[in-house]
Amino acid sequence: MADGSRGPKTVAALLLAAGSGERLGAGVPKAFAELAGVSLLVRSLRTLRSSLSVGPIVIVVPEGWLSEAGRVTADSGIAGEVGIVKGGSTRRDSVARGLEALHSHHDAILCHDAARPLASVDLVDRVTERLWASRRGPAGAAEGADGVVPIVPSRDTIKRVRGGWVVETIPREELGLVQTPQAFRAEALREAHARAPSGEAASDDAVLLEAAGFRVAVVDGERSNLKVTTEEDLRMAEHILGTGGGILWSSRS
Ligand code: CTP
Ligand code: MG
């Protein structure tokens, strides 16, 4: 059941594109590298813009890349409110800068990595919708989520390895691989960032909410929503674009 206690919810998005892309080694920051002729940045931007749930978008880019980001954004013809700001030295710092740049009030903030250019508009909508949905907990009380992350279950057996030896096999039933876009109640995201000890690394935002005691719910992610880290991932993404025919692999498969 949707939370209808107030008027329509407003959602802003942060597009995290300020990494250097060292492991990809494209000679440009990863977000500016191209996948089948279109940069990862523009692909992610189009996806966010195509979601009717998303209002303003702030793109966070590396120092020295503001004007190039402005140029590719203008060339892509993407409409609506799009701001571009300089990121920080870690992803967490980049999110913090993006949050500072979002002046106006929004009910929710979506964080998406430019490194995931194949996320679908449907996934953007689903993480956002889940944020407003209420669920009945074990005691029958309605439980709202402070954050929502897409998860795909691990199909592989996972082992802890140390110094070339298997230490243990980790039961995988409760393990999931987390993706972006992730949706957060704006206040919870800001508070989680403010409360986390400075210098504490965070490879996603949900981890900061978890540490602060907020409730993070999950929705089904998409196997096709891979994270481009190395050259091999780019080839894999090209393959998905070329052979997928727009059919997304669901995590239920
Ligand atoms: N990111 C960011 N600011 C940083 C570091 C990362 O906005 N200081 C963003 C990246 O642009 C990317 C996402 O966070 O969209 C996930 O980071 P990752 O995949 O590690 O990208 P890079 O840091 O660019 O890659 P590498 O670690 O290989 O340098
Ligand atoms: Mg990185």
Image (cartoon, rainbow, N blue to C red):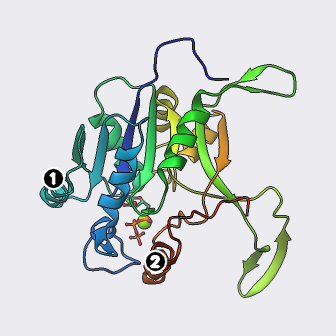
Q: How many numbered marks have been drawn onto this rendered protein structure?
A: 2
Above or below for 164 versus 65: below
Can residue 95 be seen in the rendering of this structure? no
Which residue is rendered at x = 61% and y = 35% of the image? 130
Q: Mark 2: which secondary structure?
A: helix
Q: Residue drawn 12% across and 56% down?
A: 67
The answer to whether 73 is drawn above or below residue 13 in the figure is below
* Circle nearer the N terminus (1, 2): 1
The quadrant in which the C terminus is found is bottom right
Left or right? Give the position of 96 relative to 153. Answer: left
Pick the front one: 126 or 18? 126
Q: Identify residue for label 2.
A: 242
Is residue 20 among what the camera can see?
yes
Whether pointer 1 and pointer 2 mark residues with C-beta atoms closer than 8 Å, the reply is no
Q: Amino acid at mark 1?
A: Ala
Q: Relative to the observer, which residue lies in front, 15 or 169?
A: 15
Percent x, y for residue 111?
44, 45
**Which residue lies at the image location 53% right of the left edge and 72% below the top edge?**
244
The amino acid type of the residue labelled 2 equals Gly
Q: Residues within 10 Å of mark 1 (few under 14, many from 20)?
A: few
Residue 204, percent from left and from top: 52, 52
Q: Which mark is residue 201?
A: none
For label 1, the residue is: 74
* Label 1 vs label 2, nearer the camera: 2
Q: Position of residue 161 (x, y in %)?
A: 74, 78
Q: Quadrant of ligand 2?
A: bottom left
Q: Nearer the viewer, residue 252 or 201?
A: 252
Farthest bottom residue in view: 164
Can you name the residue that lies furthest to the front here?
245
Some atom of ligand 1 lies within 8 Å of the CB belonging to the residue at label 1: no
Position of 252 with respect to 130 (left or right) is right
Distance from disc 1 to disc 2, alpha carbons, whole Å, reads: 26 Å
